[in-house]
Amino acid sequence: MYLSPKKLKFLLNFYPPYIGAGIKITNVSDDWKSLDVVMNLRWYNRNAVGSHFGGSLYSMVDPHLMLMLMQILGRDYYVWDKSASIEYIAPCRSQVRAHVRISEQQIQDIKSHTAQGEKYLPEFTLDVLDPDDQLVAKVIKQLYIRQKPKRRQD
């Protein structure tokens, strides 16, 4: 399914779990290689000690790599989230943000590793930062990517 970057931004910003967590997409580049997301601290997304709830920190970066790569690679590829881990570095009681980036080198690596139909399990590291660029959390996402089998032309 093809979406424009503007439409994805609109849909995610009205996605009920994102509204409930206070998550907002601020930018999706026209080439799908970057996405910016922020989350303000609100009474409804605080944990027991008054900082950002860990689940919300993860949620703010969760689907983006998969959605972006689906658009970049197109319908000839399977792209799925495989696994993720999050390391909480420091509590934060203000806005947090993340820059999700996919480099041209990463795209070329994916294409070369899947050229013969092999699965590829690349890992991406995403940093969640506070307003002073201090690291709040580090998320490591592993994706499953495979080129779809070519249809025979009879």
Image (cartoon, rainbow, N blue to C red):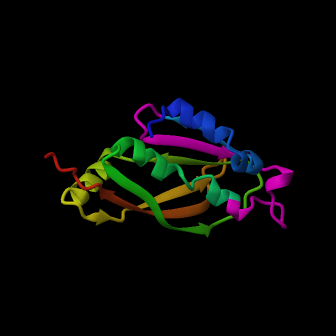
Name the foreground residue: 130 vs 37. 37
Q: Foreground residue, 82 or 56? A: 82
Rendered view: 63 above or below 15: below
Quadrant of the image for the N terminus?
Answer: top left
Q: How many marks?
A: 0
- Can residue 25 be seen here? The reply is no
Range of the magenta residues? 29-55
As drawn, 152 above or below 136: above
Residue at screen point 25% across, 58% down:
114
Q: Is residue 79 magenta?
A: no
- Indicate the position of residue 44 as horizontal and vertical percent values: 84, 53
Where does residue 49 sit, x and y in percent of width and height?
83, 66
Residue plotted at (30% across, 48% down): 76
Location of residue 121 in the rendering, given as x and y in whole percent from the top left corner? 36, 65
Locate residue 89: give its quadrant.
bottom right
Residue visible at 48% across and 35% down? Answer: 3
Q: Is residue 36 magenta?
A: yes
**Would you say residue 126 is visible in this rendering?**
yes
- Left or right of residue 109, residue 57 in this image: right
Where residue 62 appears, as percent x and y from the top left, is 57, 56
Q: For this view, does 12 lie left or right of residue 94? A: left
Outermost residue on the front side: it is 154
* Left or right: 1 in relation to 138: left
